Image (cartoon, rainbow, N blue to C red):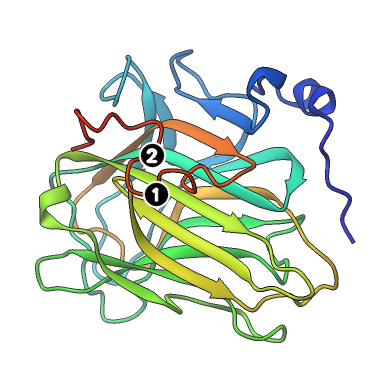
Amino acid sequence: MNIFIRNIAVIVSLLPLFITNSNADLIAKDDFEAGTWGSFWGSLANTTVSPILSKDGSYAARFQYPGVAITEDGWAEARFDLGGYYEQLSIRFDLYVPLNYEHRDSGSGNNNKFFRLWNETYNDLEKIGATTYNESTSGESGIGSDYRLASSWGMSSSVKKASDFITTADKGNWVSIVIYIKAATDSKPAELRIYKNGRLHLEDKLNINYVPGTQGYRHGYLLGWSNSGFTQETIFYIDNVEFHDNDIMSATPSTPSWEDPANPVK
């Protein structure tokens, strides 16, 4: 069974961007305004900190997928290490959907990674995540939960689906995302909820307690491998990333604390 790291002093020593006890539920954050990656980021693929476009301020993380043939895939990914194991996590970020976004039907695998979380290694039995999938001739995307349906299986994608996650109306706009995950226990399934612009979009309960005891999440990545690939170079931006060790949507599920009701995210 994993030992969960709860000592904020230890966490601060590991990750300089971690904050003090004045807001202990916030594990880490990065608005990229230093012009570089925060210390909790790790392996990066086709991803930079860029001054070209940002939600707030001057910089954001830029995820660049190349234009490829219909038979080829794409890849842009930012991995992170939270320095400790958390039974629950809220991950919040702003996502810019490019004007030329098109989730094409490649004729084979069309699931594109949106995020992943795991404990120690990428092959952990209780790794969870979500992918987007092609759902229309206009290149729009739904989203679905990803996890192992049995301990002897590999990851199954889009287990529970929700349509209209990235639509034509989102192109050229910033979309606010919150992902909430609660690990499974011996008596309760894991929980996954994904919010778009402050509203619940996908909810799933995952029977993935393959390892006895309560597990925790430490490692993960945002975006990732695109099995559909993109016909044209397609560039996403991510800004204002936050990791919390509680459910930041529980108090105000329709209007989260970081969104001003008088000036909603567009």
**Which residue is drawn at the image coordinates 71% and 53% (left, top)?**
87
Q: Which mark is residue 256?
A: 2
- Quadrant of res 206: bottom right
**CB contact under 8 Å: marks 1 and 2:** yes
Residue found at the very far front of the displayed protein: 251
Q: Position of residue 180 (x, y in %)?
A: 52, 53
**Which residue is drawn at the image coordinates 18% and 39% (left, top)?**
173
- Quadrant of res 183: bottom right
- Label 2: how many residues lie within 10 Å, few (<14), some (14-19) or many (20+)? some
- In the displayed structure image, the side of residue 27 where residue 112 appears, left or right: left
Q: Name above or below for residue 149 compared with residue 266.
A: below
- Label 1: how many residues lie within 10 Å, few (<14), some (14-19) or many (20+)? some
Q: Quadrant of the N terminus?
A: bottom right
State the CA–CA distance, disc 1 to disc 2: 6 Å
Q: Is any atom of residue 20 visible in this view?
A: no
- In the displayed structure image, the side of residue 265 where residue 91 appears, left or right: right
Q: Name above or below for residue 124 compared with residue 209.
A: above
- In the displayed structure image, the side of residue 255 where residue 113 appears, left or right: right
Q: Name above or below for residue 225 compared with residue 38.
A: below
- Quadrant of res 190: bottom right
Tell me the element at label 2.
loop
Q: Position of residue 92 (x, y in %)?
A: 46, 40
Q: Quadrant of the C terminus?
A: top left
Q: Nearer the viewer, residue 72 or 27?
A: 27
Tell me the element at label 1.
loop
Which amino acid type is marked by label 1? Answer: Pro
Q: Is any atom of residue 37 visible in this view?
A: yes
Q: Position of residue 207 (x, y in %)?
A: 64, 79
**Which residue is drawn at the image coordinates 43% and 47% (left, top)?**
178
**Residue receiving disc 1:** 253
